[in-house]
Image (cartoon, rainbow, N blue to C red):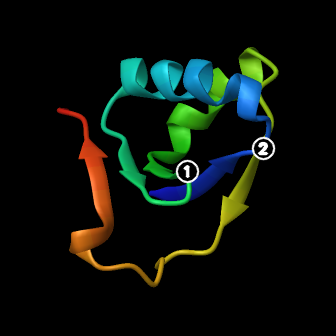
Amino acid sequence: MVGIRIKNPEQRAEGFMLLVRQGKVRAWRGEIYVVREGSLAVLEAHNISYERLPLPLQLSEADVERDTLV
């Protein structure tokens, strides 16, 4: 799993939906997403820029906003 933040606010919704279609996505406050490494290829294919964040993130389960199904 890898933590990312989509840099461009205009691309954030599109990027999130692309990630959801690839599998499980954990979304945290601050527009931070935790996804599988392989899911990043879809962002790159659509030219959506993102930054990697170091894991483990220093957040608690109470900070989770939404979680998609596998």
User: Quick one: which residue is furthest to the bottom in this view?
Assistant: 58
Task: Tell me: 26 left or right of 55.
Answer: left
Is 17 or 56 nearer to us in this picture? 17
- Kindly report the distance in space between the C-alpha atoms of the residues bearing marks 2 and 1: 9 Å
Query: Which residue is drawn at the image coordinates 74% and 17% (left, top)?
Result: 45
> Where's residue 61, x and y in %?
23, 72
Q: Which mark is residue 7?
A: 2
The quarter of the picture where residue 41 lies is top right
Dot 1: element: loop
Is 17 or 29 nearer to us in this picture? 29
Residue indicated by mark 1? 31
Q: Give the quadrant of the N terminus.
A: bottom left
In this view, 18 is above or below 69: above
Query: Which residue is drawn at the image coordinates 52% and 33% (left, top)?
Result: 39
Mark 2 residue type: Lys
Q: Residues within 10 Å of mark 2 (few under 14, many from 20)?
A: few
Query: Which residue is drawn at the image coordinates 47% and 20% (left, top)?
Result: 17
Task: Tell me: 26 left or right of 47.
Answer: left
In this view, 40 is above or below 35: above
